[in-house]
Amino acid sequence: MLATVRTFTLDGIAARPVRVEVDVHRGLPAFSVVGLPDAAVREARERVRAALVNCGFEFPLRRIVASLAPASLRKAGPGMDLAIATALLTASGQLSWEALSRLAMVGELALDGSVRPVSGVLAIAEAARELGAETIVVPAENGPEAALAGEIDVIGLDSLGQLPALAAGEWMPARPQPLPLVLSPEQGDLDLADLRGQRHLRYALEVAAAGGHSLLMIGPPGAGKSLAASRLPSILPPLAPEEALEVARIASACGRLGGRPVGGKPFRAPHHTVSPPGLVGGGNPPSPGEVTLAHRGVLFLDELCEFRRDALEALRAPLETGWVTIVRAGAWQRLPCRFMLVAAANPCPCGRGDADAECSCAPQSVRRYQGRLSGALADRIDILAAIRQPSAKEIGGEPGEPSAAVRERVTAARERQQLRLGGGRCNAEMTPGETRECVLSDAAAALLAESYSRRRLSGRAHDRVLRLAQTIADLAGAETIERDQMAPALQLRRRDHE
């Protein structure tokens, strides 16, 4: 007999439909899986065999062929175990399920027949809904995650032995409740008030948060760069519901959801030893990197000049487009990566900088150290903030303005950008055409033209200054960019100030 069950395989962060076709016929006992399976899929034969026997089913001693269609699509992961086992039971006459053609299944089988959770269930449930499936059967632990997809019935299965009662309508588990989408995470102890002094750095953080701009902080060790970066999420506006679902989908596909509530903007801080594939994604088959895990959130690169240059150069296209395209022989992925880049660097290897008399770094070593950051990448960073070591009076003084007060101004500025741009976009995401539509006063236009000529700004830098000026105007509630907004925007792209 022949039986067919619908399932899915993960392709990056997307779910691709797969039809599991199992044929049981006479011949020497054998169990073959065809259709470009990876090692985990091929090993399903042994898991399915043991699970069937340990759940009281009979494993047919016949020739069994499981075909995974389409044959040209590479299949990866153990998530097709449940579908293969169900199709095998149906093809061998041990299971009769009228609704089998209207549902999809995903899950890994343990040797005792229990159904283990798998990654990417949210994307799989959404794909099943889009393809017209009425029900999806998933591991019980993945039930709340699958319920986030909406508009599709979710059945959480604990064991393969529950299938006969489920197919006969004698047993139906309770419908799982969706995981809560927490749009704004608890702030906890991370508050911008901890950053004392550093007036210029606080202002740069506020402008960066208000417009979604990238930020590079350059200063000596202990000046507050890492502290400032860790407090940045506390002044960002909450995620929109569709953005939170997008973040959850990526976390699910990467196996990082784990049944926990999804909340707040992601904050990723990879170590400087990260490889280019680890940072932007790669491998074979291609998988997401840190830039995709930071989608709709913050990617913090501490000790920027310690990162490998090829890893940093790989950031150029994602920063510009908000997408990363990974191409391999026979496979490619286009992954979202709209993130805020926040980086921190020392001025030289010893960290003191040439303004400090104790700095002993030779000019050649300083050039080599700073050369890790190419001019092309630096040109794509909106804000370049040079900071100094705070004084003892500043460190021991009163706390700075709390995150709640700054977040109110940032949220108000984002709301103005939403009315103007739509689509949940911010000023950092403006197209060149939208950037040219910014309304400037004559004085602001003259100042920008003068700086463009005198400082030899690139065309990209010209547009980024305009976007910064628009963000500063949004913070001030102004409809027109005046000279008072253009001057600080130009200043925020300089390294030679406090």
Image (cartoon, rainbow, N blue to C red):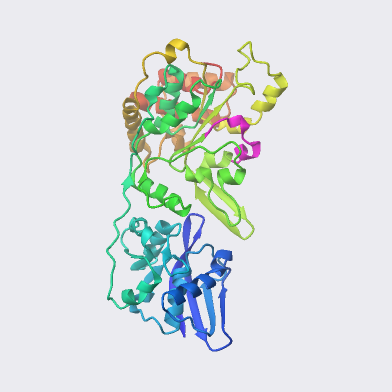
- Viewer can see residue 184: yes
Q: Which residues are magenta?
A: 301-314
Q: Please give the count of numbered marks on the rendered protein.
A: 0
Percent across and percent down for residue 231 are: 42, 29
Residue drawn at 48 percent across, 54 percent down: 13
Q: Which residue, as the protein is rendered here, is positioned at the far bottom?
A: 26
Residue drawn at 58 percent across, 45 percent down: 278
Q: Nearer the viewer, residue 490 or 104?
A: 104
| Location of residue 397 by image quarter | top left
Relative to 391, residue 182 above or below = below
Percent across and percent down for residue 380 are: 55, 33
Q: Nearer the viewer, residue 265 or 127?
A: 265
Is residue 478 left or right of 311 when viewed as pictured?
Answer: left
* Magenta-span inclusion, residue 304: yes
Relative to 252, residue 263 above or below = above
Percent across and percent down for residue 490 are: 50, 21
* Magenta-span inclusion, residue 215: no
Percent across and percent down for residue 276 are: 61, 43
Q: Nearer the viewer, residue 416 or 3?
A: 3
Relative to 467, residue 159 above or below = below
- Viewer can see residue 480: no
Relative to 161, residue 445 above or below = above
| Location of residue 208 by image quarter | top left
| Location of residue 408 by image quarter | top left
Residue drawn at 41 percent across, 67 percent down: 114
